[in-house]
Amino acid sequence: MKDLLRTADLSRADVELLLETSAEFAAKPLSANTALANRTVAIYMTKPSTRTRLASETAVAHLGGTPIFIRGDELQLGRGETLADTARIISGYASALIIRTFAQSDVDELGANTTIPVINGLTDDDHPTQLLADWVTIREQFGKDISGRKFTYVGDGNNMAHAWLTMGAIMGAHVVVATPGGKYAPDANALDVAKEIAKNSGATIEVVTDPEAAAKDASVLYTDVWMSMGDPENERSEKLKALSPFAVTPALMSLTTPDSIFMHCLPAHRGEEVEVDVIDGPRSVIWREAYHRRTTIQAILYHLVRGELSGH
Ligand code: CP
Ligand code: NVA
């Protein structure tokens, strides 16, 4: 496996290795501090980022390398240079490329035209590095045995919902995604991918429109912003109205198991998709989850650059 272009690229064995290494990097951040010595990692983002950018830059530093951060408007791409040419150039300088952008097809094209690993740092369709951080955090809470547990995401059927379904499928989990349906449902293609993986992993995949039923007896209640980067502003009020029954309130949380946790990839909009009493309450693990963005990106870089992930 050369690249991490989408969550579905990862095999269960890859995820297990990455979770293990992330836990090691959490305990000992500098345990591989020469892995990228004298090497660079390019981080190219055409959308804003707080966590993914900081986690990526610190991860590279902890591996002894130098991050090169490039904003979307800074490359000759904006003046008509092709993605393929850009990919060849970056391959000549850097040992890996972390990319955050809109179209998944751009990430795929970069992967196809680079000789170095390309890592998806979020697209409109997927967010694989986030899901690894989420699952390290889940494992810290519940351990390896997740039988009988339900992992619920409520909200918009966006990149996070897709990644939630796919990673849950890989992990053999009972995953539930509750959205208002229609244009806010997860993409059919993402659901098909998760269902295909679930055939072999034993996962149970449910996509529903009832937030209460989805929250009932869940061990994890996860949500994300209702307006994602790139969503049309002129549809904001319609979208917020459609999503309002999916807000994570103390009442929704009270339907979950006694040991349940609240998760959110962040950034959050308190009072919109989640109420303050939940996100800042005792069941919220958001800060640990955000912390693991660094440990997991560090693990991904470490193993991908060494060619140690097998993929499917
Ligand atoms: N969760 C996440 O990807 O955060 P950023 O958008 O700040 O990188
Ligand atoms: N769905 C959100 C995730 C942010 C990490 C977005 O794409 O903006």
Image: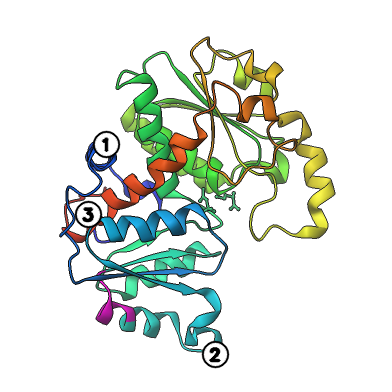
Give SS at disc 3: helix
Above or below, comparing residue 268 to residue 82 in the picture: above
List the residue tagged with mark 1.
Answer: 23
Distance, label 1 to label 3, CA atoms, is 13 Å
Residue segment shown in magenta: 90-95
| Residue in front for this viewpoint, 80 or 301 | 301
Q: Position of residue 96 (x, y in %)?
A: 29, 67
Distance, label 3 to label 2, CA atoms, is 33 Å
List the residue tagged with mark 2.
Answer: 79
* Amino acid type assigned to the residue bearing label 2 in the image: Arg
Q: Please say whether residue 249 is one of the residues in the magenta stretch.
A: no
| Residue in front for this viewpoint, 62 or 229 | 62
- Name the residue rendered at 28%, 64% in the picture: 117
List the residue tagged with mark 3.
Answer: 302
Give SS at disc 2: helix
* Amino acid type assigned to the residue bearing label 1 in the image: Ala
Foreground: disc 3 or disc 2 = 3
Residue 64 relative to residue 45: left or right: left
Q: Position of residue 134 (x, y in %)?
A: 43, 37
